[in-house]
Amino acid sequence: MENYNEQDAYKRARKKVREIKGFYINVVCYCTIIPILIYVNLTFVPEFHWFWFSALGWGTGLMFHGFSAFGIVPGFSKDWEERKLREFMEKENNIYKK
């Protein structure tokens, strides 16, 4: 049983490391591509700054990716899910006990 728990913990840790690695790869891509888009935009169409759409859209996605990778999703973490499940189960148990 102990070996199973170690394997399970290893799998969870490995998944978490992959999520964080994916976030860092996303950050590097963002920091590489957005300046290229800014250069292209300001070189060819300087009167309209369309690069903001890409920067803000991708930046927002990057922010949520970071929240997810580091477990900082406000209000919707795994702990929140567990608390809500217990809360609903307790309510149902109280209803059926009456």
Image: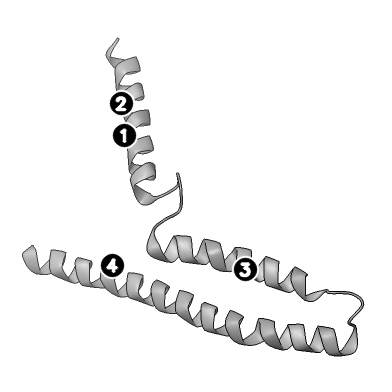
Asked if the residues shown at circle 2 and circle 1 are in contact, with their CB atoms under 8 angstroms apart, the answer is yes
Task: Name the residue carrying label 1.
Answer: 86
Task: Report the residue that reaches farthest toward the left.
Answer: 2
At 41% across and 79% down in the image, what residue appears? 21
On the image, the x and y values in percent for residue 35 come to 68, 85
Give the amino acid at mark 1: Arg
Give the amino acid at mark 4: Arg
Q: CA distance from mark 2 to mark 1?
A: 6 Å
Task: Name the residue carrying label 4.
Answer: 12
Coloration of the structure image = one colour
At 30% across and 9% down in the image, what residue appears? 98
Is residue 49 toward the left or the right of residue 19 in the image? right
2 or 4: mark nearer the eye: 4
Residue 17, label in figure: none
Ranked by sequence position, the earlier of labels 2 and 4 is 4
Ranked by sequence position, the earlier of labels 4 and 3 is 4
Q: Quadrant of residue 32?
A: bottom right
Q: Secondary structure at mark 2?
A: helix
Few, some or many C-alpha atoms within 10 Å of disc 2 (few <14, some 14-19, many ≥20)?
Answer: few
4 or 3: mark nearer the eye: 3
Q: CA distance from mark 2 to mark 4?
A: 28 Å
Q: Secondary structure at mark 3?
A: helix
